[in-house]
């Protein structure tokens, strides 16, 4: 089970904490130095994909020199996102003609079958609200 605690901080911002002690500060989309909740969602999609693509590509003997991505989505209504687009930025190892094919194959499989966050978005995971009292 994944659990994150989110609370308002003394300065009026918000922080999310996991049970391992990591923290992410968040606020509105105009607040400097913090992620907005939508940006955190996009970071989760990107993180889920990239942390799975990297080891699987390397395990197949094709360690990429550079592996980065941009994840974007446009708001199509005030409370609705359009499709999410993941754009990889990779530098292939010199002298490895199979690296591109392996990377592309792994990246497609990871996004379609192995990234829990992408799958949750595609499958419209139910969100349950529990109020005190």
Image (tube, rainbow, N blue to C red):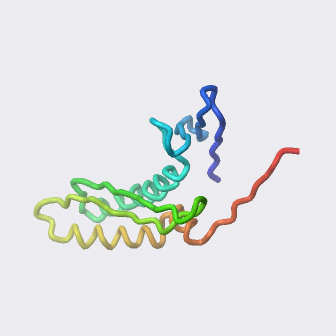
Q: Nearer the viewer, residue 72 or 6?
A: 72
> Farthest residue toward the right?
133
The number of callouts visible is 0
Q: Position of residue 22 (x, y in %)?
A: 53, 37
Where is residue 132, by image quadrant? top right
Q: Position of residue 27 (x, y in %)?
A: 55, 40
Residue visible at 42% across and 59% down in the picture: 72
Residue visible at 46% across and 36% down in the picture: 32
Residue visible at 54% across and 40% down in the picture: 26
Judged left or right of residue 64, residue 19 is right
Q: Nearer the viewer, residue 14 or 93?
A: 14
Where is residue 87, by image quadrant? bottom left
Residue visible at 63% across and 45% down in the picture: 4
Judged left or right of residue 37, residue 111 is left
Depicted 11 relative to depicted 25: above or below: above
Q: Nearer the viewer, residue 29 or 7?
A: 29
Q: Nearer the viewer, residue 68 or 21?
A: 68
> Farthest residue toward the left?
95
Judged left or right of residue 97, residue 18 is right
Q: Position of residue 113 (x, y in %)?
A: 48, 72
């Amino acid at each position: 089970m994944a659990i994150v605690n989110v609370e308002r901080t003394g300065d009026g911002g918000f922080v999310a904490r996991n049970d391992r002690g990591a923290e992410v500060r968040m606020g509105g989309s105009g607040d400097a130095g913090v992620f907005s909740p939508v940006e955190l969602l996009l970071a989760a999609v990107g993180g889920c994909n990239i942390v799975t693509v990297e080891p699987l590509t390397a395990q197949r003997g094709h360690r990429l020199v550079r592996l980065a991505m941009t994840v974007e989505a446009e708001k199509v209504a005030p409370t609705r996102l359009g499709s999410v687009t993941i754009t990889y930025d990779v530098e292939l190892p010199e002298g490895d003609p199979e690296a591109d094919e392996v990377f592309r194959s792994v990246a497609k499989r990871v996004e379609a079958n192995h990234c829990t966050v992408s799958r949750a978005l595609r499958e419209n995971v139910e969100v349950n609200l529990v109020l005190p009292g």
